[in-house]
Each structure stands twice: as structure tokens, then as C-alpha cells.
Image (cartoon, rainbow, N blue to C red):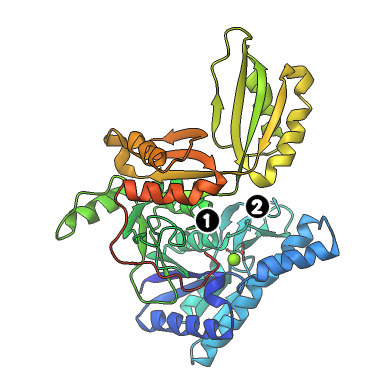
Amino acid sequence: MGIVVQKYGGSSVADAESVKRVARRIVETKKAGNQVVVVVSAMGDTTDDLIDLANQVSPLPPARELDMLLTAGERISMAVLAMAIHDLGHEARSFTGSQAGVITDAEHGRAKIIDVTPGRIQAALAEGSIAIVAGFQGVSQTTKDITTLGRGGSDTTAVALAVALAADVCEIYSDVDGIFTADPRIEPRARKVPRISYEETLEMAAQGAKILHLRCVEYARRYDMPIHVRSSFSDKEGTWVTSAEKVQSENDSQENAMEAAIITGVAHDRSQAKITIVGVPDKPGEAAAIFRAVADAQINIDMIVQNVSAAATSLTDISFTLPRGEGQTAVTALARLQDSVGFAALQYDDSVGKVSIVGAGMSSSPGISARFFEALSDAGINIGMISTSEIRVSVVVAETQVEEAVRAAHAAFDLGSDEVEAVVYGGTGR
Ligand code: ASP
Ligand code: MG
């Protein structure tokens, strides 16, 4: 008997009716001869509501207590789902992250999983029960306190459990039919991607595509755990996230083997901001001092651009992008350096967005950047910054032009289908 891990997102268990629908789906998987472990997110917008509640009580809730509060959301889902399964005449037992053996470090709000010891889950399965696990939470190895893995962390719980249980597959259910060539809310002609590699998925997720939690994909890649992303509202085959070799061999074995697309998808991100440090003296150690200050403030930066210094002044400008939520912290940290580094001014711009094209095929085909930039230029879109990896080209544009840029890139690489394929069943995007 194979083990299947299924994860249901908040929009799939938003109310009692949805919980019952999901329960029927789980029972069917069990009846088909599988051992089933289910990971659930909090119902609908519960996590946001709990955060609002905390903020009404205290402007700065202690991280330990906030985690304790937020994990309650997933506990509600797991218990009601187990009840709904019982009602269908099947055994189901719910477990908190801690009971399921999800051991983390002690970083409240963004804890990392360091070990999974799923003894109680295995025992429940051995007794013929369905195991339901609360996503997004664990217990710290050192402090024994309850932790959360960061927003969207239930995906990571699911993959980590799938790995620990040596499951055949980790199925991730949301309110769309899989991973699309672009966000269907922006580009209605977006196509479902049948197969995609871990690496491409990582790039898409890191560049803002709200498909899977980034750490979940990193985890899946490390242990080669296939993920099947699909909708809980339909029975359609979704998107398979696997190793690049597997994608290649599946594509080759297709009847009318099409030439693999060079670009797999277009991702966009509206959560970024840009900081420019104007008039930095062009001498060794300046960039080091600037980025040390940003790093010490625990800020993750993304693109960096340094201009050639003007010959007359020997001064240069350095720009970088970072998450908008961390903009003020970064500006404060940098302002403190103004005298020691001796730069002229700081500029902060949070009306930017990022658009990226991702595809494993681009490393072996020339002209991809040119085609992308021409499409943007034809649409009258100015590029603020550019960065690339082996399988990605990203640009920063004005936030107001993000959607147009996505559509322009999508069309330039012929990603659109003739019919509308994407159905958005829920509405939260998760
Ligand atoms: N309920 C948590 C959140 O909304 C975790 C999750 O949905 O994966 O962030
Ligand atoms: Mg959620």
C-alpha cells in the first residue's frame, strides 16, 4: 500500500460544506487503496483574522504568544475535518504539528524544520486510520515552545511529512488547477503547465508566483519528492513538479513529442521596493559597508545594480531591491552610515514591481533577453533594473505597468492558449 500525503489550503476548507467535500475526497483516496496523511491550513482567512485580533490587543504581540495564537487556526481545521471523515464512516485522527513530530528551530514566525519524527502518524496509519496534521506549525527542539513556519508554511509541512514517511507523492490542493504560464487573473489565456522542474518552480516562487511556499520546493528538491499541484474543486490532473530529468523523459515520451518550450512561465511580484544610494565614493569597501548594514538588519535583498562612476566626480550610484515590508528598516540602517560612507542621498521607491520569465530551455537558446526586452519596449514599458540567472530574466518596472508587462512577455513567447483554460474556483489565490 502506498502512502499519499495531501495538503489542503485555506480556500479548500473555508466553511463546513468545503470541509465535507474535502472529507469525501480523502475517503475516496483511502478507498482506492492508499494510506492517507492529510495536512490542513487554517479555514479561509482565519490566520489573517487572528493576526488582526492580536494587533487589536497589542501593537507588538510577543512572538511566542502570536505563534501560539496562529496555530489555533490549523487546529480548528484538523479537528473538524477529522469529524467530517468520521461522519462518512471512516477512522481519522488529528494531530498538532508537535504531536506529528515536526521539530523546528526556535525562530518564532519563521521557524525552520530540522527534523520530523512521525511515530504517532505511522502508528495511526498502521491501525488503518487516516491521519490529519495541522500545517504550518511545529515545536522548538531547544525551547519546547510552539512555533510557526511563516505564512503559507503548510506546504512545507506537507512535503516534510511526505519525505519522512517516504510517501509516493505529495499532493498540494488549492483553488486553481495547477501551475499556470502566468497568473490567470492577469492573463486569461494562461495555460496549465503539465510538468515543471524543481528549479523552475523555485525561480517562479522566488519571483513572486504564488504557487508554492518557497521552502517547500527547496525541501522537495533536496529529497526528490514529487509534488502534484491540483485543485480540490475538480478532478483534473494538475501540474507535476519533479526533477528536471523526469520532466525531460516525460516530455520525450509524449506521443507527439513537441519541442520543449523555452520559457515555462512568467512570474510577477508587487511586494518589492527599490533603494538607491546616490553619490557613493568609488573606492574599495563602500559597497561592503552598505550591504553589511543591510545584512545586519536581517534584510534579504534581491537585485543589485552599481553604475560606472562619473569620471569627473568619482561618485557612483548603487540601487537594490528588497521586500517592501522591510523598506523602512533598511532606510533607517543606511541613514546611519551616511557620514562614515559619505554618500550624498538615499532614495526610496515603493511603486515598483518585478516581472520575470523563467525556463530551463533558455540556457541553451540565444536571444531570449532581446525578445523579452523588445516586447516590453513595444508595449511602451521602461525597464528600471535587470537581473538574470541561468534559467531566468527579471526586470523591475513601474508598478502600474506590471500587468501589461506580464501580458507582453506571455505573448512574446507564445505561451497563450486559444481557449481559456484557467478556472479560479476560490478567490484567495492560495
Ligand atoms: N494558515 C497559514 C497562512 O495562511 C499557513 C498556510 O496557509 O499554509 O499563512
Ligand atoms: Mg492560508
Name the residue nearer the viewer: 104 or 239. 239
Residue at position x 64%, y 22% from top? 288
Task: Relative to 289, say whether 214 is above or below.
Answer: below
- Residue to which mark 1 is pinned: 213
| Residue drawn at 35 percent across, 81 percent down | 32
Relative placement, left or right, of 30 versus 248 is right
Q: Are marks 2 and 1 in contact (CB under 8 Å)?
A: no
Front of the two marks 2 and 1:
1
On the picture, is 382 further left or further right than 357? right
Q: Quadrant of the N terminus?
A: bottom left
Q: Splitting the image into four quadrants, where does ligand 2 fall?
A: bottom right
SS assignment at label 1: loop
The residues bearing labels 2 and 1 have C-alpha atoms spaced at a distance of 12 Å
Q: Point out the tag, 2 or 1, that comes first from the N-terminus.
A: 2
SS class, disc 2? loop
Q: Is residue 319 left or right of residue 207?
A: right
Where does the image place residue 323, in percent across and percent down from the top left? Answer: 62, 44
Query: Would you name the residue on which mark 2 appears?
Result: 110
Question: Image point 66% across, 71% down: which residue?
Answer: 46
Mark 1 Cβ and ligand 1 under 8 Å apart: yes
Q: Residues within 10 Å of mark 2 (few under 14, many from 20)?
A: some
**Amino acid at circle 1:** His
Residue 230 rendering spot, x and y as whole percentages: 41, 68
Amino acid marked by disc 2 = Arg
Q: Residue furthest right?
A: 58
Query: Residue at the left extreme?
Result: 256
- Quarter of the image for residue 359 reads top left
**Residue 60: quadrant of the picture:** bottom right
415 or 74, which is in the foreground?
415
